[in-house]
Image: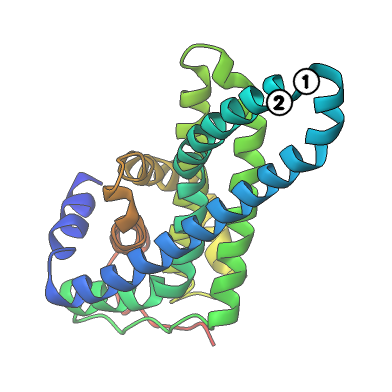
Amino acid sequence: MLDAAIKALSQMFSPPFRTVLLKSVGLALALLIVLGIVLYRLLDWLIIAGGSSIEGTIGHTAVVALAWILAIMTGLGLAAGGVFLMPAVTALVASFFADEIAALVEHAHYPGDPPGVALPLARAVLEGVKTALLAVAIYLCAVPFLLVAGLGAVIFFLATAWLLGREYFELAAMRFHPVAEAKHLRKMNQSTVFLGGLFIALFVSIPIVNLATPLFAAAFMVHVHKRIIGRQGVLVAQRP
């Protein structure tokens, strides 16, 4: 597993990966900015909508002070939200670039094996959206546990490992197996996939560096998939 992580990290500095990295980071930043704007507009609307009624109760000066407090809290909330939303964002970004990354890894490290078949974009995006929505739902459930020292962070980390390990392994496996078979393969090797997810969760927890999560995770899980299926006999890309 460590060897797979080292191989994935070393290839990230190659010229072909740098091209994908720029596109991946650009899309991730764009998604985070859009989410930030939506959250800010929503909070701003709530403040304006409730401002007049609150002002009649506590006075204009108190409302101004409350607005400043809420503005500061909103800024901090958006920053914290960016951290919590990053796994969901990278899951969505991965759906656009996972096949391109996987093809580069297969060509560099497994030239003797038949190449995988790219997943249709619609299917890849669907998998990414499902994982992103599931991530947001799970993280919202984990928010109350943040009040308990350390417990929320542990739940967040383990949930990230399970979610991202699950998605990136399936994206790698679907290049060689039908969708149902890829999901079955993941379930049969769930402990190995979860262990791989821990590596991805550690990577995505590093600020700034985590923008490159789709590259590392997709490359990493290609190696994990190859290890699971073994390299005995001929691997045929059988997915239609």
**Horizontal and vertical percent position of residue 13:** 13, 64
How far apart marks 2 and 1 lie (CA) works out to: 6 Å
Q: Residue furthest bottom?
A: 240
Q: Residue at x 56, y 72 (%)?
A: 125
Where is 105 relative to 146, above or below? below
**Horizontal and vertical percent position of residue 153:** 47, 25
For label 1, count other residues whose C-alpha is less than 10 Å away and answer few (under 14), some (14-19) or many (20+): few
The reply to whether callout 2 and callout 1 are in contact (CB within 8 Å) is yes
Q: Nearer the viewer, residue 130 or 7?
A: 130
Q: Quadrant of the C terminus?
A: bottom right
Where is 109 relative to 29, above or below? below
* Residue under pointer 2: 63
* Residue under pointer 1: 59
**In the displayed structure image, the side of residue 120 where residue 48 appears, left or right:** right
Q: Nearer the viewer, residue 190 or 46?
A: 46
Q: Which mark is residue 185?
A: none
Task: Classify residue 161 by image quadrant.
Answer: top left
Q: Residue at x 59, y 46 (%)?
A: 135
**Horizontal and vertical percent position of residue 158:** 48, 33
Kind of element beneath mark 1: loop
Q: Residue at x 42, y 68 (%)?
A: 27
For label 2, count other residues whose C-alpha is less than 10 Å away and answer few (under 14), some (14-19) or many (20+): some
Kind of element beneath mark 2: helix
Q: Residue at x 52, y 47 (%)?
A: 163
Q: Nearer the viewer, residue 98 or 233?
A: 98
